[in-house]
């Protein structure tokens, strides 16, 4: 027994370390893709509204790039919440994303020894020497892929000595017999690590090492599908009803389907042999076959399922919850403690920015169909933003009455400047963009197909930058602050290009472009102004890090 104990401790330590590296590496790839290609992903997902097959295919590709169906679900939930997609099409995208995550698991199990050093060498080189954010994030993606492969090798090495261990094999054999417990373990593990891809890779690798019986691996893989769908459910608990309806429908399909397949396998375990001769291949192929079958069957039922989930979830919001979100972060008891007071001001500015993000998300649908209720809500939100800006100015003035040292005084001025910039963004949305959307309805005109696509894509770009700005406000990360300021120049260049495209359509005599010319051009300029206002968040951070010259980025 004294000989076995250190071996068991060493095994658990190595497995835990390898699993932690696997989870982190999957996240590294996902964040790299999100930072480098967020705008392109948003545009692709929004364009997928033409039919359910295109929507599912787009979801599959998005999940392959992001290596996460959950990340796709959160993005799609945002589109559905702001009216950019109907819940049924959103559900089709999620079904495709589930299939995409299964394809990712197949790809990452390919064993090629030369890939790890090659990916590390290329990834580190791009990340350290890249001249643009996209190149650096591409390096991050390559490093993440290399670490995923490395973590799987670590799992194989850690489990190899334990193949003959009586205790380990007894635990694994129990999971092979008690499929319900294995299913629950798989679901809980996938939810805990927030990645069904990482969970499936771990289970299949244990099976390949002859530690986990194929029946137990199959149950845990099916459980990971339930856990993966539950992650998105938890992350969207506060989302509007249409977005939650879509997420719940996907949870019902994926979790319920997994439970049905588990019941079939428990009664007929020999069916697994149809999926391959090797136990690990049977487990991973089950994951792919399940999600492929689910997508094929459910795509024909997305509209009835959406209607059913709509009946389950109402759009009524809790008034007490709404009241809680209106509590100011400005602490009157911290006026005599400047550092704490400035921290509470930063929190209030983050709340201010989130409100403006909601206004920007709500303005897009008004360009398609005017809604007086939504327009009134945007105007009321603008008044709330103006009130917050006024309170922030008074609060900072109160903090400064007793005098501040140089550093705190500089921070106070920076926060005041950010507050003014955010208030300007709110004003642009409520006065300019809202009026332009109203003109489309009043004058009975519409953008040309190309013009409408350009406006939507440009709005997606600005919304991505606004989201990035809010992240920078929270984490104060110099790298993301630099990315935010660089994005300002990209937006300016894109706006100029789109203005030239519009003038070209005018020269060609396109009727829709002529009728909506001033609205189109003013919309682009207003969106650029909103983007510029939010980019102000990054300048103080870059000034401290030395990445900002007197007039431009270093």
Image (tube, rainbow, N blue to C red):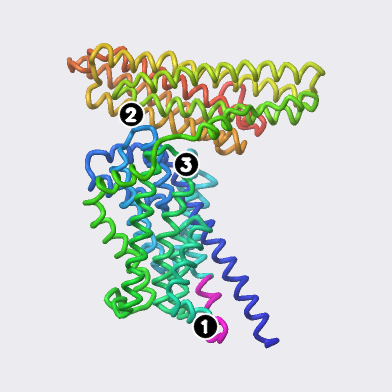
Where does the image place residue 544, in percent across and percent down from the top left? 67, 31
The circle drawn on residue 41 is none
Q: Residues within 10 Å of mark 2 (few under 14, many from 20)?
A: some
Foreground residue, 326 or 188? 326
Q: CA distance from mark 2 to mark 3?
A: 20 Å
Q: Which residue is located at x 47 percent, y 76 percent? A: 175
Where does the image place residue 157, in percent across and percent down from the top left? 53, 75
Sooner in the amino-acid sequence: mark 1 or mark 2: 1
Name the chief secondary structure element in magenta.
helix
Q: Is residue 143 magenta?
A: no
Left/right placement of residue 446 relative to residue 247 reads: left
Left/right placement of residue 320 relative to residue 277 reads: right
Q: Residues within 10 Å of mark 3 (few under 14, many from 20)?
A: some
Q: CA distance from mark 1 to mark 2?
A: 56 Å
User: Where are the magenta residues, as a range?
Assistant: 155-168
Q: Nearer the viewer, mark 2 or mark 3?
A: 2
Q: Which residue is under mark 2?
A: 456
Answer above or below: position of 18 versus 305. below
Foreground residue, 414 or 311? 311
Secondary structure of the residue carrying tag 2 is helix
Q: Which residue is under mark 3?
A: 35
Answer above or below: position of 142 versus 358. below
The circle drawn on residue 169 is 1
Q: Which residue is located at x 62 percent, y 70 percent? A: 13
Sooner in the amino-acid sequence: mark 2 or mark 3: 3
Q: Is residue 165 magenta?
A: yes
Q: CA distance from mark 3 to mark 1?
A: 43 Å
Sooner in the amino-acid sequence: mark 3 or mark 1: 3
Q: Is residue 543 visible?
A: no
How many numbered circles are shown? 3
């Amino acid at each position: 027994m004294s000989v076995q104990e250190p071996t068991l401790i060493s095994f658990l330590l190595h497995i835990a370390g390898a699993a932690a590296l696997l989870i982190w590496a999957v996240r590294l790839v996902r964040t790299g893709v999100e930072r480098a290609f967020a705008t392109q992903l948003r545009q692709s997902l929004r364009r997928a509204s033409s039919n359910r097959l295109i929507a599912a295919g787009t979801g599959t590709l998005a999940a392959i790039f992001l290596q996460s169906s959950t990340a796709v679900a959160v993005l799609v939930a945002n589109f559905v919440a702001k009216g950019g997609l109907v819940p049924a099409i959103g559900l089709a995208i999620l079904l495709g994303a589930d299939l995409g995550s299964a394809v990712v698991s197949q790809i990452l199990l390919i064993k090629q020894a030369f890939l790890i050093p090659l990916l590390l060498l290329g990834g580190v080189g791009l990340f350290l020497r890249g001249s643009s954010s996209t190149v650096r994030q591409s390096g991050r993606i390559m490093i993440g892929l290399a670490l995923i492969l490395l973590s799987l090798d670590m799992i194989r090495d850690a489990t190899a000595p334990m193949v003959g261990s009586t205790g380990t094999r007894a635990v694994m054999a129990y999971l092979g017999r008690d499929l319900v417990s294995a299913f629950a373990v798989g679901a809980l593990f996938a939810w805990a690590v927030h990645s069904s891809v990482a969970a499936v890779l771990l289970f299949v690798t244990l099976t390949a090492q002859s530690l986990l019986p194929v029946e137990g691996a199959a149950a845990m893989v099916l459980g990971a599908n339930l856990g993966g769908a539950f992650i998105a459910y938890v992350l969207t608990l506060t989302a509007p009803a249409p977005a939650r309806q879509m997420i719940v429908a996907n949870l019902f399909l994926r979790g319920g389907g997994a439970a049905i397949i588990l019941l079939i396998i428990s009664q007929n375990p020999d069916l697994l042999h149809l999926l391959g001769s090797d136990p690990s291949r049977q487990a991973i192929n089950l994951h792919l076959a399940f999600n492929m079958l689910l997508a094929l069957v459910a795509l024909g039922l997305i509209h009835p399922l959406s209607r059913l989930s709509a009946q389950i979830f109402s759009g009524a919001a809790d008034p007490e919850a709404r009241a809680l979100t209106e509590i100011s972060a400005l602490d009157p008891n911290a006026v005599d403690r400047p550092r704490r007071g400035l921290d509470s001001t930063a929190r209030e500015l983050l709340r201010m920015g989130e409100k403006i993000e909601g206004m920007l998300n709500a303005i897009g649908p008004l360009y398609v169909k005017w809604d007086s209720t939504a327009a009134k809500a945007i105007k009321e939100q603008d008044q709330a933003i103006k009130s917050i800006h006024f309170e922030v100015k008074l609060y900072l003035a109160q903090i400064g009455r007793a005098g501040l040292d140089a550093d705190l005084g500089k921070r106070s001025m920076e926060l005041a400047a950010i507050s003014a910039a955010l208030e300007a963004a709110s004003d642009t949305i409520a006065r300019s963009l809202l009026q332009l959307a109203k003109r489309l309805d009043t004058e009975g005109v519409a953008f040309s197909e190309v013009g409408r696509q350009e406006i939507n894509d440009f709005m997606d770009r600005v919304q991505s930058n606004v989201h990035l700005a809010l992240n920078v406000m929270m984490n104060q990360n110099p790298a993301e602050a630099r990315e935010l300021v660089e994005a300002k120049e990209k937006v300016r260049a894109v706006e100029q290009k789109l203005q030239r495209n519009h003038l070209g359509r005018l020269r060609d005599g396109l009727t829709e472009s002529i009728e909506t010319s001033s609205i189109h051009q003013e919309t682009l300029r207003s969106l650029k102004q909103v983007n510029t206002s939010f980019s102000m968040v990054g300048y103080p951070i870059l000034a401290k890090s030395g990445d900002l010259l007197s007039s431009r980025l270093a």
